[in-house]
Image (cartoon, grey):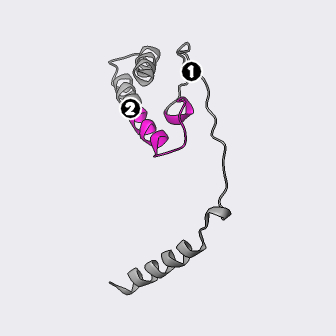
Amino acid sequence: MTRSDNRLGAGAARADRRIRPEHGQRDQVRSCDARQPWPTGPVTLLGDAIYNMTPMAGIGANTALRDADLLRRQLIAVASGERDLIPALHEYEEQMLD
């Protein structure tokens, strides 16, 4: 183990001793109905801005990455002149909500 590893290990051990269930905070997790499709315009959403999900396991981040890739593909097609913006965004939104 290197010297920095020892410091990290000691710091983690101290933090572990300070963490107690009675010091925790309970957050109420709420949910909502799934969003229905909307008319496509020049503004769209991605990731947990649109999905009904709890803040656990990085699901929001993972869906945001997936959505960003879907949107990126559509915007490349628009930039290259293969697609018009609104139909490209509409296809992205359909794929996103699938």
Three-letter code for the amino acid on which mark 1 is drawn? Arg
Residue on which disc 1 sits: 35
Relative height, residue 49 to residue 74 (above, below): below
The region drawn magenta spans 47-68
Three-letter code for the amino acid on which mark 2 is drawn? Arg
In depth, the one of 29 and 38 nearer the eye is: 29
Query: Crowding near pointer 2: few (<14 within 10 Å), some, many (20+)?
Result: few
In depth, the one of 79 and 65 nearer the eye is: 65
Give the quadrant of the C terminus: top left
Cα distance in 3D space between marks 1 and 2? 22 Å
Q: The residue tagged with tag 2: helix, strand or loop?
A: helix
Q: Position of residue 95 (x, y in %)?
A: 39, 21
Q: The residue tagged with tag 1: helix, strand or loop?
A: loop
Q: Position of residue 75 (x, y in %)?
A: 40, 27
In depth, the one of 22 and 84 nearer the eye is: 22
Query: Crowding near pointer 1: few (<14 within 10 Å), some, many (20+)?
Result: few
- Kindly identify the residue that appears in the image at 54 percent across and 78 percent down: 14
Residue on which disc 2 sits: 72
Q: Position of residue 84 (x, y in %)?
A: 41, 16
**Residue 64 forms part of the magenta stretch:** yes
Relative height, residue 93 to residue 71 (above, below): above
- Kindly identify the residue that appears in the image at 45 percent across and 37 percent down: 64
- Kindly identify the residue that appears in the image at 59 percent across and 22 percent down: 33
Asked where in the image residue 81 lies, by quadrant, the reply is top left
Give the quadrant of the N terminus: bottom left
Q: Position of residue 97 (x, y in %)?
A: 45, 22
- Kindly identify the residue that appears in the image at 66 percent across and 43 percent down: 28
